[in-house]
Amino acid sequence: MNTVNEFNIGTPLEVTLSPVSRLDLIKYAGASGDFNPIHTIDEEASKAGLPGIIAHGMWTMGNLAKLFTPYYEEVFLKEYSVAFKGMVFLGDVITLQASLESIKNDKYRFNVLAMNQRNEVVVKGDAILERF
């Protein structure tokens, strides 16, 4: 799919990320300023009662926007909201998906979700793209 003109109701978009690495989370911590150690230090995650370090929820949310980057010459991300449904751990393989729900007045409403390799939804929400 090359342009938004090719979108139809139900149009799916999908991207599978590389396994989550500690370096991914360290880079995100630096970029975002979120240095909570549960995201980068095993011992701190353990002290917090977690089975291992977890990805920042916003790291996963930000990655979901990758579904739309091929279309940013035609549209912009006007609205974006998600709910965090589960934790993402080191080594998880996250699949990002979007499905076009409606088209109205040059606005494209998508349902979006991120799932881990066990098909557990970790993030779910909506995104609206709008033509320039």
Image (tube, rainbow, N blue to C red):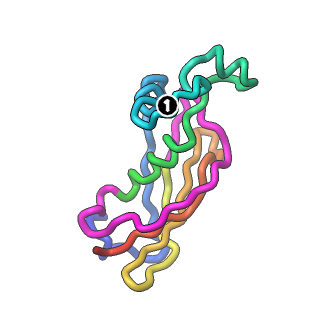
Q: Is residue 23 magenta?
A: no
Give 69 or 28, whichever is nearer the viewer: 28
Instruction: Report the residue at 41% width, 77% height from top.
Output: 107
Residue 43, quarter of picture: top right
**The C terminus: image quadrant:** bottom left
- Which residue is depicted at the point 46% across and 51% down? 64
User: Where residue 66 sits: x, y (%)?
Assistant: 39, 51
User: Which amino acid type corresponds to the residue marked 1 in the rendered image?
Assistant: Val
Q: Is residue 48 above or below residue 55?
A: above
Task: Where is residue 113? Give x, y as percent.
Answer: 56, 55
Residue sitting at the far right: 49
Q: Looking at the picture, how far across and down is residue 28, in whole percent?
A: 44, 33
Q: Quadrant of the N terminus?
A: bottom left
- Above or below, 51 against 115 in this view is above
As drawn, the residue found furthest toward the top would be 43
Residue 18: % across, % down: 43, 34
Foreground: 67 or 131?
131
- Residue at which label 1 appears: 20
- In the picture as drawn, the residue positioned furthest to the front comes out as 33
Residue lying farthest bottom? Answer: 105
* Kind of element beneath mark 1: loop
Would residue 119 be found to the left or right of residue 40 on screen? right
| Residue located at (63% from left, 54% from top) | 83
* Image: magenta residue range: 69-95
Front-most of residues 61 and 48: 48
Dot 1 alpha-carbon crowd within 10 angstroms: few under 14, some 14 to 19, many 20 or more: some
Task: Using the image, determine if residue 3 lies above or below residue 112.
Answer: below
Query: Is 2 displayed left or right of 17 in the figure?
Result: left
